[in-house]
Structure formats: structure tokens, C-alpha cells
Image: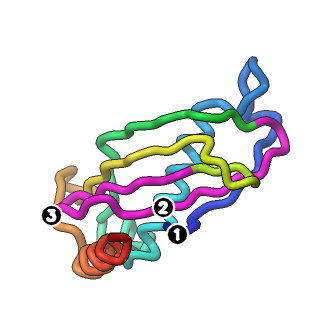
Amino acid sequence: MEYTYRGVVYPAQTDAMGHMTVQYYVAAFDQAFWHFIASLGYHPDWRNSKGEGWADVKYVINYSSELKVGDLFSVRSQVVKVGNSSLVTHHDLLNIEGQICADIEMTSVYFNLTKRESMSLPDAVRINAGAALLKQQ
């Protein structure tokens, strides 16, 4: 697994119980995803230059340990499955001790932003994601 994001919990990111709220877990996973797909060959400027991007279509999230104000955390990511137009990734959010606090499996579809329809993964992303998947096995 590759580390793809690091963060700290700020007071404004907590809920009435004093724990990081769900929306910030999802935000951390989303930011990790962008760094991860960039490492697989997707260039963020393709949103503008090619009109191509990603649409997340499914999240399965597990919460196992709370984060509080001031806690440092990191996210590590890996490929689970490579489809024609989709990519399934898994992300673990860990506290500074390395304990998994939450994890997510994300299904993301490569998308033509103008036509609003799926399209085949870019060759570089498909090749690199496939290689990452093989390396993990």
C-alpha cells in the first residue's frame, strides 16, 4: 500500500461528540484518491484540457476507531480491481500509531465530463493500476 495523504484533525472538523465527523473522513479519502490516481498516470489537468475526470459511484466505509482534535493521521491506498472504465480502490486511514481508524472501498468510473458518460480508462492508468494490482498479490 502506498501512503497517499496525511492530515491533522482541527476543531472545526469534529462533531458534537468531539470526534472527527464523517464528512472529513470522506474528504481525506477523496484527497488520497486524487493523489493515488495521479501516481497511476492520471494528470489532474485532464479535467480542463481533455474534459475527462472521475465519478465515484460506490463507497463502502467502515469506522473502527475515532480521531480527536490534534490527532495526526495518514491514508494508504491500493488498487483492488481494474475494469474497462472503472477502478476499485481501497484506502486505510490510520492514526499516528498505525492503527486503522477507518477504511473505504471506492468504485470510481472514468468519465467524459462534457457528455456525462463513462469512457475507457487511459492506457497509462490501466497499465499502472494493473501492475500495482499484480505487485500486491
Q: CA distance from mark 2 to mark 1?
A: 5 Å
Q: Is residue 64 above or below residue 53?
A: above
Q: Give yes or no for contact between labels 3 and 2 (Cβ–Cβ under 8 Å).
A: no
Crowd tier of the residue under label 3, counting other residues whose Cα lies within 10 Å: few below 14, some 14–19, many 20 or above: few
The answer to which image quadrant residue 125 occupies is bottom left
Say left or right for 105 vs 126: right
Pointer 2 residue: 77
Mark 3 or mark 2, whichever is nearer to me: 2
Frontmost residue, 26 versus 75: 75
Mark closest to the chain's N terminus, 1 or 3: 1
In this picture, residue 53 sits left or right of residue 18: left
- Can you name the residue that lies furthest to the front here? 137
Membership of 78 in magenta stretch: yes
Q: Which residue is mark 1?
A: 2
| Depicted 15 relative to depicted 126: above or below | above
Mark 3 vs mark 2, CA separation in Å: 20 Å
Image quadrant in which the C terminus is located? bottom left
User: Is 115 located above or below residue 40 in the figure?
Assistant: above
Residue at the spot of label 3: 84
Q: Secondary structure at mark 3?
A: loop
Q: Residue at x 59, y 49 (%)?
A: 93
The residue stretch that appears in magenta: 68-92
Q: Is residue 38 magenta?
A: no
